[in-house]
Amino acid sequence: MSEITHYSQVWRHRTPRGRLALWFGWLALVALFVWCWGIMTENTIWAFVADAPRQAADIGARMMPPRLSYVPELLVPLWDTLTIATLGTIGGVILAVPVAFLAARNTSPSTKILRPIALFIIVASRSINSLIWALLLVAIIGPGILAGIVAIALRSIGFIGKLLYEAIEETDAKQIEAVQATGATSAQTLNYAIVPQIMPAFWGISVFRWDINIRESTILGLVGAGGIGLKLQASLNVLAWPQVTMILILILATVVLSEWVSAKVRHAII
C-alpha cells in the first residue's frame, strides 16, 4: 500500500522577499531619523534645554493675571485682522476661480498650455507661506493691512484653486452631456451644467478658507502686515507678559468664534 503524504501550506502575510524588503525599509527609516536628529541637535546647548521647564514656569507666572484694561486698545487691531482675513479671502476667491477652470481637464480650453500654467500658479501659491508673502509685500508696498490682504489673497489662490478644480473634474458627465444635447453653447453648458454642481463645494471651500485665514492673519503683524500681530510683537518686545496673555486669549476667542461660524455656514450650505 502506497503511502500518500499530505503537505499543508501555511499562509503568510508577506513573502520572504517582501519581509526582507520591509525590514530594510525600517532600517533605512531608522538610519534617516538618526541622521536628521544629529543634524538638528548639532548646535543644541543642552544646558538651556534642561533649564527650559524652569524658564517656562517663570514666564507663565509673569503672564498671570491677564491685563483686562488692555482690551480697548486691541479692538481696532482685531478689526484689522478680521478685515485682512475677509478681504484677502474674497480676493483669493476672485483670482482662484478662473485659475481653477483653466486647471480642470474638462473645462480648460488648452490642456497643453493653459492648464500647466494654471497648475503652476496653484503650486506656487501653495508652496509659499503667508508670512513669506507678507514679508515680500511689506518690502514692496510697505507695511500695513494692504500687504496683509494681498498676502492672504495670494496664499488662498492655491488652496481654493486646487480644491475647486478637483470638484470641477468630478462633476457628473451625464448632466453635461444632457445640456450639450440641447444645442447649448460652451458658456451655457458651463452655466447650466457645471456651475450648479460645484456651487456647494465652492461655498464650502470659500468659508473653510476664510476660517483658515482668520488664524493666519493674526500673526501677519509680526512682519509688519497689520492686524493684532503688531500689538503682540510690541508687547513681546517690551516683555509685557500680561498684555501678551490678553492678546492670546483674544486670538483664541476669535478663532473659536470663526470656527463655529464656519461650521454653521458649511452645514447650512452643504
Image: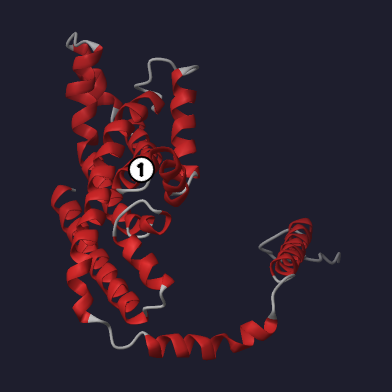
Amino acid at circle 1: Ser
Q: Residue at x 31, y 77 (%)?
A: 243
Q: In the image as oriented, which residue stretches furthest toward the front?
A: 238
Q: Residue at x 43, y 27 (%)?
A: 118
- Image height check: is 233 above or below 113? below
Image quadrant assignment for residue 220: bottom left
Local SS, label 1 = helix
The residue singled out by tag 1 in the image is: 156
- Image height check: is 186 above or below 10? above
Front residue of 251 and 112: 251
Question: At which x and y percent is residue 4?
Answer: 81, 64
Q: Quadrant of the N terminus?
A: bottom right
Q: In the image as oriented, which residue stretches furthest toward the left?
A: 268
Task: Characterize the local packing of mark 1: few (<14), some (14-19) or many (20 or more) Cα atoms within 10 angstroms.
Answer: many
Task: Name the side, left or right, on which 22 lies relative to 192.
Answer: right
Image quadrant assignment for residue 253: bottom left
Question: At which x and y percent is residue 205?
Answer: 28, 45
Front residue of 120 and 180: 120
- Image height check: is 97 above or below 71? above
Q: Residue at x 43, y 70 (%)?
A: 237
Image quadrant assignment for residue 163: top left
Question: At which x and y percent is residue 175?
Answer: 23, 25
Q: Residue at x 69, y 64 (%)?
A: 12
